[in-house]
Image (tube, helix red, strand yellow):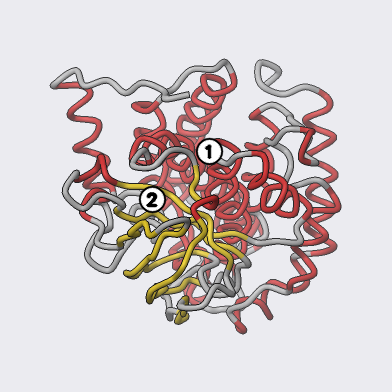
Amino acid sequence: MEKYFTEEHHLFRQGLRAFLEKEVIPHINRWEQEGRIDRAIWEKFGEMGYFGIDYPEAYGGMALDKFYTLIWLEELQRVNSGGFAAAMWAHAFLAMQHLNSEGDENIKEKYLTPSIMGTKIGCLCITEPFAGSDVAGMKTTATKEGDFYIMNGSKTFITNGVYSDYLVVTAKTDTSAGSRGISIFVIDRDTPGISANKLDKLGWRASDTGEIAFDNVKIPASNLLGEENKGFPYIMQHFALERLIMGINAHARAEYALEYTIKYMSEREAFGKSLDQFQALRHRIAEMASEIEIIKTFNYEVTKKLQDGEYPVKEATMSKLQSTKIADEVIYDCLQFLGGYGYMEDYPLARMSRDSRLGPIGGGTSQILKEVIAKMIIEKKTYKSSF
């Protein structure tokens, strides 16, 4: 792995793993039960610089290469809480990416700097009750009135949607222009007219996933991110990163599940020998290890493309499609190898199986991703960076 990682990367991983073992893992079960993460951990992440890995030093970041981000994502999966991991990366790479890419200096100072410090938490609001994968079909509107926009509509399935301090929200500013009439705004949580309800989920229990309503919300025109009606290309620009993030998450949780299962099988005996000595099980372990290694190496190479300034839409889409599929299959079999104990909440595979199931759904369903890939392969459709 010397192609991707230096000694500094390895030291960073060691320090991060120690931090998570001390500050996060002891609290995970409680956060899973309460459906809420203690505010203090966000500030500890900020103090350690973990929210600033990918951001400019001018706003308190460290401007490190993409492989530090990859390590950060991989290690978050080892705490075995998809909800906790999602809350962290949705803040750091969904909400904050838009602030950094489209926000002006005032917005960056007001929102990005405290986000890096962990004193402000953000969420990205795109999905609506009747517009998920069809982003252009959103119904939320923002009508300009003087120096303000008036927003009405709703969003759903929003990670950090209940307890965040600010919202990065998409809305139609020109209802007659389809995808060319979408804009993006940053809005303070306490702005009158915003309400949120917490959703009850199968997995990702530690994160607050919300349904949010906007009732005549008055937004200063200065809170517009980038240019009016340019929101759709801004959204598309960041989808490649989001898909790769979910691909990396998938290979990391599959690797952790297999690591745990191999250890369990070495200690569990049946018919006078440990489970890892049964040929049928050993051969499936070999298959799973091979599948994980393939997607992991692919994801590392896509990360390198991003680091080198390329815009790998096709590869990032393939990453999410295949990585989440393989992770689900690996975790399903790992739970089976634990037998009855795999079904018990005291063992990690029960939670992991629930959390993993969101992989092929969130951030673009596998069915939508297949169509995106088909267009690029069959119809030779291309996507260019707008930056």
Check disc 2: other Cα within 10 Å, few if <14, some if 14-19, many if 20+.
some
**Location of residue 188 in the rendering, given as x and y in whole percent from the top left corner:** 58, 65
107 to the left or right of 197: right
Q: Position of residue 117 (x, y in %)?
A: 79, 53
Q: Secondary structure at mark 1?
A: helix
Work out whether mark 1 precedes mark 2 in sequence or the reverse, and give the earlier one: 1
Three-letter amino acid code at the position of disc 2:
Gly
Q: Secondary structure at mark 2?
A: loop
Q: Amino acid at mark 1?
A: Glu
The answer to whether residue 364 of the structure is visible from this angle is yes
Q: Nearer the viewer, residue 305 or 322?
A: 305
Q: Quadrant of residue 333?
A: bottom left
Front residue of this view, candidates 49 and 368? 49
Q: To which residue does mark 2 refer?
A: 363
Residue 270 appears in the rendering: no
Using the image, determine if residue 297 lies above or below residue 202.
above
Residue 161 position within the rendered picture, expressed as x and y whole percent measured from the top left: 51, 69
Going by the image, does 371 lie left or right of 21?
left
